[in-house]
Amino acid sequence: MEQPSVRNRFSGRARTVIQTGQVHGDIHLLARPPRGPVRERSRRLAASAAAADTLADAVDREWAQVARDRKLYPAVEVRWGWRRRPPPPPVAGSPFEPLPGTARGATADGGGMADLLEVYAGSRSGRLIVLGTGGSGKSAAAILTVRHALRRRRERADGDERAAFPVPVLLTVTGWEHHRQHFNDWLTDQLETRYPFLRRRAYGRDTARRLIEDGRIALFLDGFDEMAPPLGRAALEAIDHGATYRVVIFSRPEEFDLARAGQLRGAAELTLSPVRPEDAVAYVRHCHGGSVPEPWDQLTAHLTERPHSALSRSLGSPLTLSLVHDAFADPSVRALLADGRFAPGEDFPVDLLDLFMDRACRPDPGPSLVPYEAADIRRRLAAVAAEMRRRGTHGLEWRRLHWWASPLPRVAAVAALGLTVGALCGALIFGPGGYRAMGHTGPWFGARHVGLQGLLFALLVGAVSESRDPRSARLRRLLVRGVPHRRSNPAVGLLVGVAVMLAVGNQAHYAWGLPAGLAVGLLAAFDAARVHPDRGRTALSRLRALGSRVALGTGGAAGASIGLAYGFTKNPGYGLSAGLVGTLALGAAVGAARLSYATDTPTDPGTSWGRDLRNAITFGAVTGLSLGLAFGYGNARVAGWGAGVITTLGHAVPIGLASAVAVSDSVRTALVFLQLSRRGLVPVRGMRFLRDAHRRGVLRSEGTSYQFRHARLQEKLASDHDEAHLHGGGAAERR
């Protein structure tokens, strides 16, 4: 007998239920239950589906750029074979069903990159381990599989099939403290940080967590072998017991075996195989557009005729093959064919990395981004590699370079800037501007009064700037305890709170200004972390997006505090106008700090740096001009419009500078580069230097961080640096 539909079961219409011919045996089914929960669940499902589609587009753009950056097209064809086949599915069913469009699952004996997608999509355990030695192409396999999975998902025309195909997200396990944080909490934080549009109100609350819990994402973990064994064991245990989503892990076999204290239940394991000679020949020919120059033709002939030679076995690594292509010019490639160049069992000759660095660091034919000699570029990169090895990391995250140097000089520099700018602007405001505070005026009073305020405020700004992702793990835990990461903006809260405190305190009394500043600052800290809604296509959605540019909630609270202070000390009309100006000024400042809806997340460190700097300049300009106009308007009503203009400029400059410094990671890192340049690590314009190294192919981008092209290159440069210091190079460098 046909089962009743959802409409028949929950419509509450007795006539409809009777017409289905069903007898439920429960009179309560004939009553009308509340339809709110049903509609709410439908709305949440639709919001999750929309968020997943937007996330898929963002991930695809991100890794498409990385694939172009790493020149993965054409990619070296890497094949794989089984190390541990997946067990047969249990009788009671499998945790995961094959994904839509899967042609064949884990039954293949092996294959290439395209077949790896079928293994992932057909896995009924949802657990896949991809193992390979150093330079075997694990990262390339991860990126290409993610892109293939996204293409497969995009091809699903049916909405239900597309919703059943999870969005692959490629991450590395960094910043997870397994003793204090659940693995899914770390994953939620990573998604919200990397893809901030997931915090849009249109998607509902806790969108990232819902996507995780509903299995709408698949986690691809690269660089598992770079984790310490205790952390790796904790990650495997957390995945084994708590992950309700598909997981693919890429690692070296030795490190993975050391980390696991058993095995992931139902996990399939496969191993990447060496590059076959015919695949290496196809790669070389593809790189030259099919017309292979004569020296390279000799190399391809050697690979074809002598597939078991030491040279052919050494070129079985994608790393070695790509380095040979980049390190040798056309005439010099004949040197590879010399007898004894490749020792039996050797991955690649010891001088291959030196040849690659010599060619990568050679002078540009045109104007260079950095005016340095090749030896200087290599020496600085070697110093960076040695510092990274000392810190046990393979990633160069520019937002965390402040961990490499003491924060005290940076805070002192910001404080000195605040004192200087404050004194100069104070003399301008209290001199020609005619501004008065506590019954005093005059340039000397203004220089002392505002200079001291600038010093104290700059110290606070420097402390807040350094508090973002501090070097101390204990301090990080203390700062984020009870507050979800990226759900608040303390820097904006400090700026708005201090502005309200000064406005109310100077006009009335600081006994009222301090609590008002604390309350409004706390509200502003959370309000500024919101994401602007999408403009959409309707007039209502555009109006809503425009209204988000001014935070009327925080602005209204600030305006009410300022308006009451001026209303009680002057007159109600003056208080009303001051309150309105304060509402618009501080509301605009908080709105300028909110994140954009844009889903084009930065795909490389240079873009991330530039966006952070532009956002800081925009926020500083809006905040400085808004608050400057507010103070200028108040003084203009007392001392005239000329004095108001001077007061506006005198307030806008220091407030704008402080605002930009407080919210910007790029400004903080620019000060770090000054510190590191004194140690010989990077030049003063450090970001431009790193961009140039990336352009030369020495560094590669991994999200918003840099890495050396391979761990072996980093190790080689670090060893060269230590050897140079051991033989007196350090003394020469210091001189």
Image (cartoon, rainbow, N blue to C red):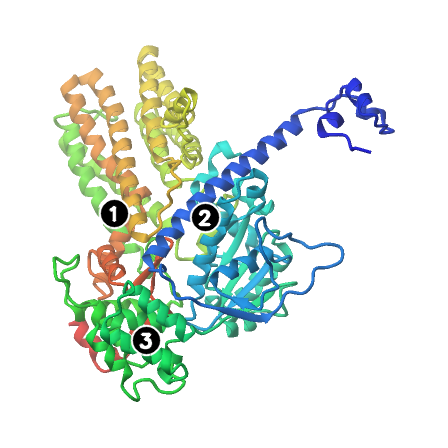
Res. 192 visible in picture:
yes
Residue 113 against residue 31 in the figure, above or below: below
**Front position among marks 1 and 3:** 3
Question: Which mark, residue 479?
Answer: 2
The type of residue carrying mark 1 is Val
Give the distance between the C-alpha atoms of the residues marked 1 and 3, in whole angstroms: 59 Å
The type of residue carrying mark 2 is Leu
Could you tell me which secondary element the residue under label 2 belongs to?
helix
Q: Quadrant of residue 342?
A: bottom left
Residue 588 against residue 262 in the figure, above or below: above
Question: Which mark, residue 414?
Answer: 1
Q: Nearer the viewer, residue 261 or 178?
A: 261
Q: Nearer the viewer, residue 443 or 378?
A: 378
- Quarter holding the C terminus? bottom left
Mark 3 sits on what residue? Answer: 300
Alpha-carbon neighbours of circle 2 within 10 Å: few (<14), some, or many (≥20)? some
Residue 83 against residue 7 in the figure, above or below: below
- Give the image location of residue 609, x and y in percent: 29, 49
Could you tell me which secondary element the residue under label 3 belongs to?
helix
Alpha-carbon neighbours of circle 3 within 10 Å: few (<14), some, or many (≥20)? many
Outermost right residue: 25
Q: Quadrant of residue 511?
A: top left
Which mark is first along the chain, 2 or 1?
A: 1
Alpha-carbon neighbours of circle 1 within 10 Å: few (<14), some, or many (≥20)? many
Residue 581 against residue 403 in the figure, above or below: above
Whether residue 339 sits left or right of residue 512 in the image: it is: left
